[in-house]
Amino acid sequence: MTDRDDALRRNLGWTGPEETDYEPDAPEPEPQRQAPPATRPPVDYTPADPAPASFGEPARSAPDHRPPPPPHYGPARDTGPLPAAPRPDGGWAQPPAGPPPRPQRPPVPPQANRPPWPPPGPGYAGPQPRPAPQPGSYAEAIRADELVPTRRTPPTRGWRRALYRATFGLVNLGPGPDEVRQAELEQRIKSVLRGHYKIGVMGKGGVGKTTVSACVGSVFAELRQDDRVVAIDADTAFGKLGSRVDPRAQGSYWELASDPHLETFADVRSRVGNNAAGLFVLAGEATPARRRVLDPAIYREATSRLDRYFSISIVDCSSTMDSPVTQEVLRDLDALIVVSSPWVDGAAAAGQTMDWLAARGLTGLLQRTVVVLNDSDGHADKRTRSILAQQFSSQGQVVIEVPFDPNLRPGGVIDGTSTMAPATRRRFIEVAAALSAHFPSTDDRARERY
């Protein structure tokens, strides 16, 4: 160590040991005061000469009598990295290369019941708790329609059926709109029926009243196989309903009403006939040689015995509305079919029939009446049919047009709907569906229908 070093140590006030490799800590820098903003000095201002400073001492400036500057609250500035601290091995720590990374905050999980922000008005009651699952049966929770794939019903007619058969069942487009509509009508006919349901068929002679009775009864018998359907010939002018349904039928009103041993259905079965569709028939007087007049008492006794075993009855009424038997039939009807030809004379007769019913206060029965425009000879005018259908429907009745079908020629046996033309069968299904809309939903055996 030289004399110059000793003199420097004395000037700096160092009194520590004299190690050759020891270096003192760097003096802390004094904080620099922010220079006040430059102001214009007064005119008579004379700066004072600063006193000469001695060697080793900083020069002192003249005292400043100006007011201190206002505090500065500007944005924070970066003053640089902190001075490095000495390491234990005598070296100096290196400052970091850049600013330290900020710690990442963990993501906030979404809350299902978190209230909206900003909060709603004072009427807000807070989030509502979810309802607890209701206890139920495990067997009811297992639904077969959700587990077993449903198979589409194949089409039964039209180009859809041709495509289905051509592709060996690989392309199944299902039933067409017309098939779906027919399925809905058939399902309506199969709806629940409580008690008995009696349908009367009225109309002028020669309009196809007996044919309509046999066809509507066959539709009910085919589609409601759990019920027994019977057609009753109540025409006093030598009705032909028995010969149209079953020419071999032997029984009649008088045998059925006078038999004291009718205890089972087999006993009744021997007194009535039936066709291939399952429609039973109670024929009228078949032999003109032994003319027996049907009176209301015989009719009432015979039909009361039939009501024990048959749910639906189709009654072919007489063309004479003022006859006592027709009056008795009307007392026990639930619905009515008025048959008209698509000509002016037949439509006028049908209108007179409905006026006659309205005059006697049978407005409830008129609301359950279906008008059938039956083209029995195939010569009906399309314009005339449409005009008559519009006139009847304007009164609130359901009007259905039945086209001409050579399979239903007069005098032939109606064995069922399989021999009908598709359009004719569809119309009779519509007639039966319109009548089924008035099926009673409660047991009404004891009510008075008149």
Image (cartoon, rainbow, N blue to C red):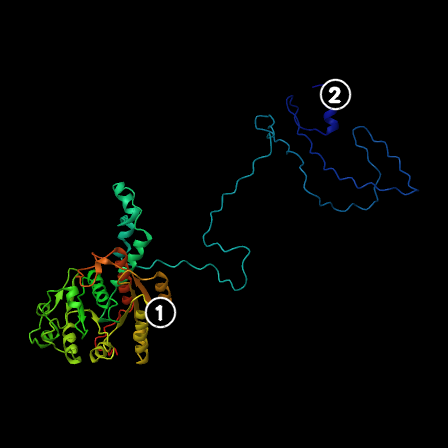
SS type, badge 1? helix
Foreground pick, 342 / 83: 342
Question: Quadrant location of residue 72?
Answer: top right
Left or right, 38 with respect to 141, comes to right
SS type, badge 2? helix
The tag on residue 392 is: 1
Looking at the rendered structure, the kind of residue marked 1 is Phe
Residue under pointer 2: 4
Question: Quadrant location of residue 253?
Answer: bottom left
Label 1: how many residues lie within 10 Å, few (<14), some (14-19) or many (20+)?
Answer: some
At a point 75% along the width and 27% down the height, the residue shown is 11
Label 2: how many residues lie within 10 Å, few (<14), some (14-19) or many (20+)?
Answer: few
Query: Residue 127, image x and y in percent?
Result: 46, 58
Query: Residue 191, image x and y in percent?
Result: 26, 64
Say whether residue 126 is visible. Answer: yes
Looking at the rendered structure, the kind of residue marked 2 is Arg
The tag on residue 255 is: none
Say whether residue 138 is visible. Answer: no
Foreground pick, 322 / 287: 287
Left or right, 156 with respect to 263, comes to right
Foreground pick, 356 / 152: 356
Quadrant in which the C terminus is drawn: bottom left
Query: Residue 258, image x and y in percent?
Result: 9, 77
